[in-house]
Image (cartoon, helix red, strand yellow):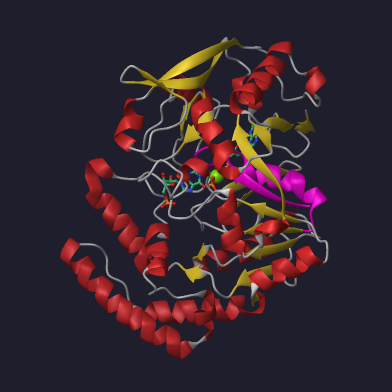
Amino acid sequence: MNTLLVGAQWGDEGKGKIVDVLTEQHHAVFRSQGGNNAGHTVHIGGKKYVLHLMPSGILRPRCQCLIGHGTVIDPLALVEEIKGLHAQGIKTRGRLFISDRAHVVMPYHRVLDQGREAAAKGKKIGTTGRGIGPAYNDKASRIGLRVGDLLSADKLTGSVRDRVKEINALARQHGWPTVSAAQITKDYLAAGKFLAPYVTDTALKVNELAARGRKILFEGAQGTLLDIDCGTYPYVTSSNTTSAGLCTGSGLAPNRVGKIVGALKAYTSRVGEGPFPTESPDLADLLHALGREFGATTGRARRCGWLDGVLIKYAVTVNGIDEFAITNLDGLDTLPVINIAVAYQLDGKTLTAPPAAIEDLYRCQPVYQSFKGWQADTTAVRSFAKLPRRAQAYLRAVEKITGAKINLISVGPGREQTFGS
Ligand code: GDP
Ligand code: IMO
Ligand code: MG
């Protein structure tokens, strides 16, 4: 059975850790959208790995890994990531497959991303600055370059020259850094040469694997509320992060999907700007003091808050989440009271689904249900039955409020700190 794993919040739900755990029951892991804006952390035997474009399955030696046409690939960053894995004794040849159709993030995409953010002042999105939005923009405008183009000196040289001319003119107007077409062409051809043995049609490959009964795990990046359509637009990323997006981004035929799992953090975090109705600076202070909730890609302190039943129910609906893997339950271990938003109040009305207009979402007041905290260390617990009663009650309440079952519980970053419910 093929599994789609999606983030149910604003990203950083612990998808990397859950992928690592679930990979034991899968033959392949597929990354099908986003780029190196993602940062997926996996702890194995006391060692920490942070993966950006590479599927987290790369850390399991027998697992095949695919990066699909729905991603945007910074080839220089990907080469560095592959070399970093090689330096740690992790092999990639014969196990890693990269789509020839995935769009390429160019240095000028980063110039545009960072330049626009710097100029936006009060309207910043708080992007990762990796050029993701401008790369998807070029794709949608049909002027992008794809991984297959890195293998053709003629095509790359001409396209880069034309686009650099255009972007440097804009950069000069705005006082942004300019880039060199010759340098980009040289660097990207070299990266293309390095990546060539991995490049293939991953859409055909994934459907062949599925037809042969190989079980594939689709590793979502970002989260539902960062989805360009379903998320808190415009404070979103530029891809479809939801379950359907994993199908279009990989080419997996939708009738081959088995199960849809939502990665859910036991509280909420968000990095970047945008509305966050259940935000709690006190909870953020507590987690930051414990050294937790700093971004895996940018190092930025993440905003933190209570679980938001309104948004999670929305995520359950639009993804078709069959079950949750809940992470970071231990993050709540010390709290005397824990809240979950069950509705919003807006202009005297009670809402049970998020409003479309961002201005309205900013004004929503959460209606909380409060729970007594368990105030006990759960990090050594290895079964639902051994969890404190109040932690059990909290998890049951999450199921009731969101309408989806919790199947996996994580109480620490390690592989072993995980159990079924
Ligand atoms: P991702 O982007 O969804 O893969 O999540 P990140 O890796 O960006 O952030 C999740 C963070 O939580 C990482 O530092 C993980 O190591 C950590 N983590 C995951 N599950 C747990 C858990 O159950 N408890 C604790 N303490 N940390 C966890
Ligand atoms: P993982 O896969 C959390 C956020 C950025 C910003 C917005 C747009 O680790 O969960 P972008 O650079 O994509 O144009 O930024 O999206 N963002 C993430 N937040 N986790 C991520 O990935 C994110 N990827 C992008 O902070 O608010
Ligand atoms: Mg992350």
Left or right: residue 125 compared with residue 381: left
Q: Residue furthest bottom?
A: 154
Query: Going 47% across and 88% down the picture, which residue do you hit?
Result: 153
Measuring from the top left, give residue 73's x and y in whole percent. Answer: 51, 66
Picture quadrant where residue 168 is located: bottom left
Is 4 magenta? The answer is yes
Query: Going 27% across and 70% down the picture, which residue do you hit?
Result: 178
Query: Going 67% across and 35% down the picture, which residue do you hit?
Result: 324
Measuring from the top left, give residue 221's x and y in whole percent. Answer: 56, 50
In the image, is residue 313 above or below residue 398?
Answer: below
Q: Residue furthest left?
A: 173
Res. 110 in view: yes
Query: Going 62% across and 61% down the picture, which residue do you hit?
Result: 84
Which residues, given as a range, are shown in magenta? Answer: 1-27
**Nearer to us in this view, 270 or 91:** 270
In the image, is residue 349 above or below residue 409?
Answer: above
Measuring from the top left, give residue 184's x and y in whole percent. Answer: 40, 77
